[in-house]
Image (cartoon, rainbow, N blue to C red):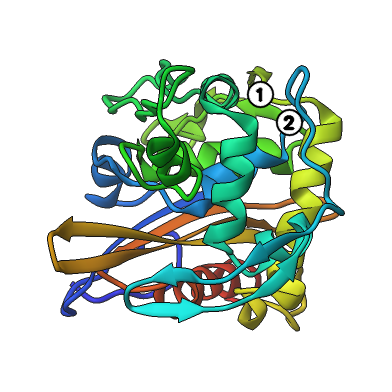
Amino acid sequence: WTWSPGPANHYEGSAYTMKILYLDCGMGAAGDMLSAALLELLPDPDAFVAQVNALGLPGVHVSRERAVKCGITGTRLSVTVHGQEDLRSAFAYSCNSAFAEMGVRLGGKSLREAGESLLFNKKLPLTMDYKSSVLSVDGKSGVPLMMQTSIGQGNTLVSPMHMAMVASAIANRGVLMKPYLIDRVENYNGDQVKKYMPDAYRELLPVSEASVLAELMEGVVEYGTATSLGGQGYTVAGKTGSAEYGEGEIKDSHSWFVGYSNVEDPDIAVSVIIEGGGTGSESAVPVAGAIFNSYYYE
């Protein structure tokens, strides 16, 4: 196979395995990647935890202005010192130290409640076979697991489909739509037999929280880890992630990007993971850019 941006996306012939989920109003996906997007669970990047840490939970408040000190962040493959940061810059630069501190402050119980509000450990509104995403942290969890979960590591597992659904809900002011694959059915004469229409599932998060997340995701593209997606004829909001995997001293990192385009009136949401692809900005962001360019320019 060769990969070319467009309605049907396939990729092969590299050391990396790429899974793309490309959602529009009809939430379509292509070929074998659909089953991978639904059935494969992988370590979740900062993308999930950044959303959890930005949520206004009962009795818990994480200020966008409160400073945290980043002494070191990143994976074994890429290490950066960010210094003093608030939530905006921690989100934009994908700062593990900041997320770990905020996660411990929130506590395991609040992290789990926020995650389950985003359908972790829950059934997804899908008619196709899929695997539910896993979030194991709770009120009895120790500090190490809380910190690991807060940077999308630990026992956290998520499918690309689920992350695309979360991104689309943020773009849709907190409301998740039911994904479907078929736009319409036609007979052999080309006459329409049936038309499928968008249908809301439920509100995953209030408009106020979705707006905060949208603002933070815009910062990622404006001055953070996904600036290469800026300067186009369309706008993008998103979150990069690097999810480490492996045993002992032999470790690698999956490259993630989740986001959506045309931020004022969103058009499509994407979830990209490149297995073994390194950081999110290194591999997943260019693929997301190719998908957006295909949608708007081809």
Q: In which quarter of the image is the C terminus?
A: bottom right
Please tell me which residue is depicted at 68% across the width and 64% down the height of the picture.
69
Element type where label 2 sits in the image = loop
1 or 2: tag closer to the N-terminus: 2
User: Residue 105: which quarter of the image?
Assistant: top right
As displayed, is residue 235 above or below residue 247?
below
Q: To which residue does mark 1 refer?
A: 204
Q: Is residue 171 above or below residue 217?
A: above
As rendered, which of 292 and 189 lies closer to the eye?
A: 292
Q: Do the residues labelled 1 and 2 touch (CB within 8 Å)?
A: yes
What residue sits 57% from the left and 71% below the top?
71
Left or right of 239 on screen, residue 210: right
User: The residue under label 1 is which amino acid type?
Assistant: Leu
Q: In which quarter of the image is residue 89?
A: bottom right
**Residue 169, placed above or below residue 70:** above
- Which residue sits at x=75%, y=26%? 60
Quarter holding residue 198: top right
Residue 52 in view, yes or no = no
Q: Which of 98 and 115 is in front in this view?
A: 98
- Residue occupying image coordinates x 47% and y 30%: 180
* Relative to 228, residue 130 above or below: above
> Residue 153's mark?
none
From the viewer's side, name the closer residue of 193 and 95: 95
Q: Distance between the residues labelled 1 and 2?
A: 6 Å
Instruction: Pinpoint residue 151: horizontal percent, then vertical percent.
Output: 48, 50
Q: Which residue is labeled 2 in the image?
A: 174
Label 2 is placed on what type of residue?
Gly
